[in-house]
Image (cartoon, grey):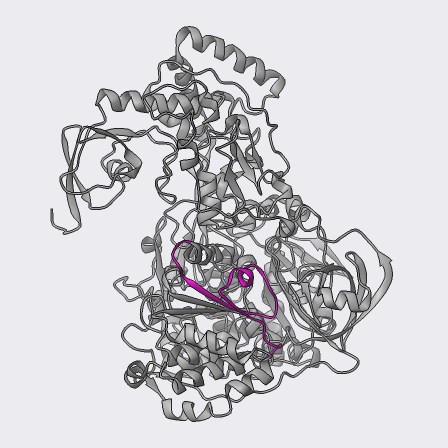
Amino acid sequence: MNKASDCTIVYDGKRLSGKQGMPLVEFLETHDIDLPHVCYHPSLGAIETCDACWVEVDGELKRGCTLQANEGLEVSSQHEGARAAREEGMDRLLSKHELYCTVCENNNGDCTLHNAMVDMQIPIQQYEFKGKPYPKDTSSPFYTYDPDQCILCGRCVEACQNVEVNETLTIDYASDNPRVLWDGGKEINDSSCVHCGHCVTVCPCNALMENSMNTHAGPFTDMPWSLKRPMIEAIKVLETTTGATPVSGLSEMDSAWRQPGLKKTKTVCTYCGVGCSFEMWTRDRHILKVQPTPDAPANGISTCIKGKFAWDFVNSEKRLTMPLIRENGRFREAGWDEALDLVARRLLKVRDTHGPDSLGFIGSSKGSNEQAYLVQKIARLIIGTNSVDNSSRYCQNPATKGLFRTVGYGGDAGTIQDIERAEVVVIVGSNTAENHPVIASKIKAAHKLRGQKLIVVDPRKHEMAERADIFLRPNASTDLVWASALSRYMFDNDLADMPFLEKWVNDVAAYRESLEPFTLEYAERITGISRQALIDTAEMIGRADSVCLLWAMGITQHSHGSDISTSLSNLLLVTGNYGKPGTGGYPMRGHNNVQGASDFGCLRNMYPGYEKVSDPEARKRWAKGWGVDPEQLSDKVGEGNFLMVQSAEKGNIKAMYVIGEETAFSDANTHNVHSAFENLDFMVVQDVFLSRTAEFADVVLPACPSVEQEGTYVNTERRIQRAYQVLEPLGDSRPDWRILTDLAARMGYDWGYTHPSQIMDECASIAPMFAGVSYERLEGWKSLSWPVAADGTDSPLLYTDGFPNPDGRANLYPLEWQAPEETVDDEYDLMLDNGRLLEQFQGANQTGRSAGIWDQVPHGFIEVSPELAAERGIEEGTWLRVTSRRDSIEFPAVITDRVAGKTLFMPIHFGKPGVNALTGEHNDPDVQTPAYKETAVKLEVLDKRGAPPLPSTNYRFGRRTPSRGVEVEVKWARDDYRLPPHTLANPRKL
């Protein structure tokens, strides 16, 4: 043994070496030894409910799942009592589970119960199965619970209570007929269940199963139950005469028959920036299920409703499958040669006629890194402009600016694991539970199980605010004030980390002087947060050993979002919360690759790897890498997408190429966006659907979603992951990288890429930040967090040895508070907040293709506070007209204390043009991010009533039933329970 952490145990007389402290069942698996177990799961630990893993240690029977490998441990699985106990445990499980494996959708080689039963070679089922007095719960549009298949192992409960921490599921072990309960006995779809799919993922049998598996999994599963039921009954009779072995042998054959047509492919989620990865199971083009694994670096076994279930769009009949060319005001289908020839010719003509800066390019924040790289390469190398951007302009550029000003890198300081291990987590302007639910689950688990403290600052009382130890509700757009007041408090009360500041931070004195106006009294007056609440918050942050601060669009989408973001990073520097585990700033990225699109060069002022286009040395290196003279690359900062649209309206931008962005829906002041697009001489849109943006195009190119192409993506924690191709492109659609490669060739640049790995290799050979990135190093579940050295060494935690500035130090950045550009007045007397919902995503172009999603949230609404509703006579379902200084829209009311006073909230997903008919073009002057969150409105109550816009079954009306997990002790305490190998009179109830 070479490592101090190694140990040697004796198992059934064999000496085995491995990692000290590893659970015995996992330790044995590393030696290809399977100790039968059902309830144990590596992400859940020992639940101790299944009684199938008994072994003998020092003359005593012990559950193998509870044992850890330690030096000198001696274990016997062959002891007669241990074998008998295991078989009794399995018999008890089978008494609760009706076996019909060969016609079961779950017999695909990974049914834990089936595999354990076969491995144990159970000769015959000792206890007769009898059905439970409960119907199958089919109320969810996504999954089904069958009590007659449920073995009461509790995996689902443990996952719901302590992994997802939605706290919906329990088991009523004390009842006569125990079962899994949703909110104490509600139907699934009438409970607090958020349809994250955790429970389905960990179920060891078919008690919980995705509806998408029904009839598609195996050769016999599509038979109607009128045929299945007689077959099942006949097999039961056969088993009582021949024993279980021939029957289980048949099911093993069935499982093997399924494998050739069953494809399991690792991919990365196409929704938010958490970067969940998982296996996607398919048969032909049918997506059977999404199956996460503990190996996934960002999410483990976790998913949300979208990542687990919202993939119907992939096979939607609305998919674009042929290029479209506009003629006489209408689209007609065209071949690829005609479409690409036209695009190449027109783009070059605009360049040659009006100059390079008359064109603008918008790369997709949902496309791959390779797509982003090629978009900026075409813009910079072929066209000669730096007017290239992505949707981070609408959300995260202010956060990136704040980080560049202070600590030097425009990304999360550490990993999701750092957030989990922090002593205090501060969430500001982020509805994390709905927008980044998997990260929220990690925080909820740390808060519930490990004593982490949680501070939430937000005008809206969402779930994380309800769970917080401190919840602050500031006046809109005043976050810089309280953050700066907290920084001053740290200096004034000896809570600033002076040794850290002296060693690592510049401009401390100047910054401290700039804090003079930010007294607690001033902060209370401006923000509306009480002086004592500010003190309590400062004390919790200042006295903690480690603090992570998360923020999102509630901070960035303001007229001074860059300054607010800077103030948050300043606070972290003052308290020494950078460069050590469990610390740092974490701007939550909204799209699956909004980080990567920026990292790989879709920014108006940066080459890939955040090298400035105005830096002669960077320009020289990129020119050399691309084989051209530096003079061919412009050193002029281009225009971002927000300014591109304005320039198009003025006639300065003549042509635009937009990939995978719903700019016509997402940009502020929709009417001006539409008129700008109509003013273009030529417009190309490359997308999966005929989006609202594509309706303005002259040419529409049909791209593939992520699951139909290979590529890499960067999540919110700077983690680069590889996604493999799951399905062939639908129709004649093509991967983004191939479309762009073919287009470049028609424009005179035949780069010859035949695989996206070659594009990554090229980028890594030029950009120092990605020097060690390769597809080989990203194989399977492996990932890399930038910056990555040439030898492949990556950087999960930044700033451990200083900051990426010339002197190796961070910078405190003095600020002044500036009032928001748009505020209320006597006429526009309310503020309109807006954001995402858990169930939908952006303009619903993808999630909107799933009927089950619409079942949860059928249409849009306006949240109104109880006090405002009472004042103006508004009831649930009352239709309201909301009018800004630009336009009006109408939606029904939801009355809720999630909002307070004279603040309204609208989800962004609904209606065309939707909420951006109301938002204005006032923006952050540093990065031009529109101030979506600064929209003053007036409200008119219409004489129109409708049904409540949120169905009564929506999870927001559910009542959670928190527990510490599976309460197996209740089962053990029952008078009729006996430890195996004792038999039971009625094992179905235990």
x and y percentages locating residue 962 in the rendered image: 51, 48
Query: Of 551 and 349, which appears nearest the observer?
Result: 551
Tell me: 272 left or right of 78.
right
Question: From which residue to which does the magenta span run?
Answer: 449-477
Number of marks drawn: 0
Residue under the image location 40 percent in, 85 percent down: 812
Residue 767: name its quadrant: bottom left
Query: Of 96 and 964, which appears nearest the observer?
Result: 964
Tell me: 908 left or right of 91.
right
Residue 469 on the magenta span: yes
x and y percentages locating residue 838 in the rendered image: 59, 55
Q: Is 88 drawn above or below residue 777 in the view shown? A: above
Residue 347: name its quadrant: bottom right
Residue 944: name its quadrant: bottom right
Residue under the image location 24 percent in, 36 percent down: 28
x and y percentages locating residue 127 in the rendered image: 43, 16
Query: Of 833 and 729, which appears nearest the observer?
Result: 833
Q: Answer yes or no: is residue 9 visible.
A: yes
Please state, as top left, top right, bottom left or bottom right, where the C terminus lies in the image: top left
Query: Of 751 and 144, which appears nearest the observer?
Result: 144
Residue under the image location 53 percent in, 15 percent down: 232
Tell me: 176 left or right of 187.
left
Residue 351 on the magenta span: no
Q: Answer yes or no: is residue 633 visible.
A: no
Q: Is 734 drawn above or below residue 635 in the view shown? A: above
Q: Is 405 drawn above or below residue 598 in the view shown? A: below
x and y percentages locating residue 880 in the rendered image: 80, 64
The residue furthest right is: 943
Residue under the image location 35 percent in, 84 percent down: 494
The residue furthest front is: 975
